Image: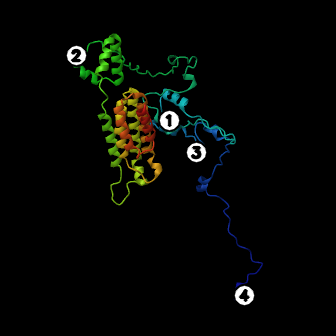
Amino acid sequence: MKEVMEVSPDAPRRTRAALAEIPARLDRLRVTPLRTLTNTREVSPSLPPGYLSPAPSPDEFLIQQRGRKRLPVTWSPDIDLKRSTFLSTVRTPPKNTPGRNSPPKLGVTLRSTPRKRLLLGDIERVPLTPEKIDFSDLSTPQKFKINSPIKLTPPIKRMRLEKTFDGEFKGPLDTALKGLSPTQLIHMIKRITHKHPEVEQEIRQDMPTPDLSPLEEKLCYLKSNIFKSLPTSRLTSKTDSPAYTRVATHLAAFKKCLVEQGKVLVESQHWESVIKYVFLAWSYVRATPVWDNQPHNAHRKQCFKALNNFCMTALKKGGFTKDFIVDIEDKLQGMEADSEEVQSCIKYVQGLMQN
């Protein structure tokens, strides 16, 4: 077997030809090396590098002209000249980062934000640029104008409400007086008494005392709001901190109304009505809840203190008779248990009775 496999060294070596010639049918596989582009922007300066393609032949260019017209490659929809100029004024300039050495992109339209493109409606906006505004004289608002092609609508002329009615009122007098404010009534009566001094004495004699029923109705309404805000469950307390939190707003409104009404009566100098209002409002303050936490009773104490001050002012300036002062002392004795502030009024009344 070894003898058969052995080959004599003198025998010639047989090898195949290693593709000596390339057939003509493979000539199409030849590749022409492209020249190195040193600067791609010199070939097509209007397109980014991703859109570069070989130049079309004249025949292909002619076929493209005969076919369907293609839209030019742009970054934003085509707009007219006016809108393009407006966009150039409104568009935010590109940021130039100092650390980057990238050359500026030529031939590429900068894209604006969607919000700015939405502003390009049928009506042009006023470009807020220094070139469009005249800052030469800002002394008057009329000279501060914006040069804009938009024609603004004329300003609406304001109606003069100060114009007085020259004609005489034909309706009933009481109906006309209901529409006047207290200030208007005061000015009207003062003008009449100034023209006719004899009328003033008659007005003083016929002037009634202030009606306290509207004041009482308002206090009653605000007090009812306080009790409506309290919890209705029998398992919860109505005088603890959570209950006070629900009622605090109504307590503040009640105190504000009580103080304002008392101030109006004091300013009107109807001293007898002031004393009556003090006794009336005191009963409503006494009916308000007494809270478990003492700081929560601040509104209640402030109301008592305000009423005591009103009473002291009326006692000092009222000049009441002794019978009326005795009646006041009896009522003040019953109010002493609610607030210690009443003791000052009681002492003053006792001093008036001794004199």
> Taking 340 as reference, is 40 left or right?
right
Q: Nearer the viewer, mark 4 or mark 3?
A: 3
Tell me which amino acid carries mark 4.
Answer: Glu
Going from N to C along the chain, the mark reached first, 1 or 3, is 3
Assess whether mark 2 and mark 1 are in contact (beta carbons under 8 angstroms).
no
Secondary structure of the residue carrying tag 4 is helix
- Along the line of sight, the residue nearer the viewer: 323 or 19: 323
Distance (Cα) linking label 3 and label 2: 89 Å
Tell me which amino acid carries mark 3.
Answer: Gly
Distance (Cα) linking label 4 and label 3: 70 Å
Picture disc at residue 3: 4
- Along the line of sight, the residue nearer the viewer: 93 or 128: 128
> Taking 107 as reference, is 6 left or right?
right
Going from N to C along the chain, the mark reached first, 4 or 3, is 4
- Along the line of sight, the residue nearer the viewer: 216 or 85: 216
Assess whether mark 3 and mark 1 are in contact (beta carbons under 8 angstroms).
no
Assess whether mark 4 and mark 2 are in contact (beta carbons under 8 angstroms).
no
Tell me which amino acid carries mark 1.
Answer: Lys
Distance (Cα) linking label 1 and label 2: 62 Å
Picture disc at residue 116: 1
Distance (Cα) linking label 4 and label 1: 95 Å
Picture disc at residue 127: none
